[in-house]
């Protein structure tokens, strides 16, 4: 990657999923499944489109995460946690199911 590509990549909001180690892929799969699980546990089972809109993103943003095409950057991850009424620790706790939203 040349300098121009590196500078252009710095401005990207999300990381595109490419070839990754099994360790990283396991977490990426967990994140896409967890976002869907938490979104559907919200009152009114918010659509991917509505959640994207509410977060100020393009209409297919959450769908892109749910499909595994992109991962949110840290600030957007924190906004997703807030939107779903969970802490980052609760997000990564496989056994946690938020009683406030289910």
Image (cartoon, rainbow, N blue to C red):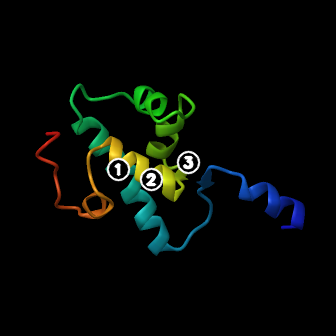
Mark 1 to mark 3: distance in Å? Answer: 19 Å
Residue 7 to residue 65: above or below: below
> Residue at label 3?
69
Quadrant where the C terminus sits is: top left
Q: Please give left or right for residue 34 compared with residue 44 in the image.
A: right
Evaluate if marks 1 and 2 touch, with contact meaning CB atoms under 8 Å apart. Answer: yes
Q: Are circles 1 and 3 on residues that touch, CB within 8 Å?
A: no
Residue at (83% x, 67% y) in the render: 1
Instruction: Label 3: state its secondary structure.
Output: loop
Give SS at disc 1.
helix
In the rendered image of this protein, does residue 94 appear above or below residue 85?
A: below
Name the spot of residue 53 as percent of width and height, x first: 48, 28
Q: Residue at x 44, y 53 (%)?
A: 77
Nearer the N terminus, badge 3 or badge 2?
Answer: 3
Task: Name the secondary structure under disc 2.
Answer: helix
Q: Which residue is identified by label 1?
A: 81
| 3D distance between C-alphas at marks 1 and 2 | 6 Å
44 shown above or below 74: above
Q: Position of residue 85 (x, y in %)?
A: 26, 45
**In this rendering, would 21 be left or right of 93?**
right
Question: Is 36 or 54 nearer to us in this picture?
Answer: 54
Query: Residue under circle 2?
Result: 77
Q: Depth check: 101 or 29 in front?
A: 101
| Among the two numbered marks 1 and 3 on one chain, the one whose residue lies closer to the N terminus | 3
Classed neighbour count for the residue bearing mark 2: other residues with Cα under 10 Å, few (<14), some (14–19), many (≥20): some
């Amino acid at each position: 990657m040349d300098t121009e590509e590196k500078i252009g990549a710095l401005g990207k909001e999300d990381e595109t999923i490419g070839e990754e180690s099994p360790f990283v892929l396991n977490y990426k799969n967990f994140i896409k499944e967890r976002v869907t699980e938490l979104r559907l546990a919200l009152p009114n089972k918010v659509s991917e489109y509505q959640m994207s809109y509410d977060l100020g993103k393009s209409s297919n943003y959450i769908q892109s995460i749910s499909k595994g095409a992109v991962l949110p950057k840290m600030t957007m991850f924190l906004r997703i946690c807030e939107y779903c009424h969970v802490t980052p620790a609760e997000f990564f706790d496989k056994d946690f199911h938020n009683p406030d939203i289910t």
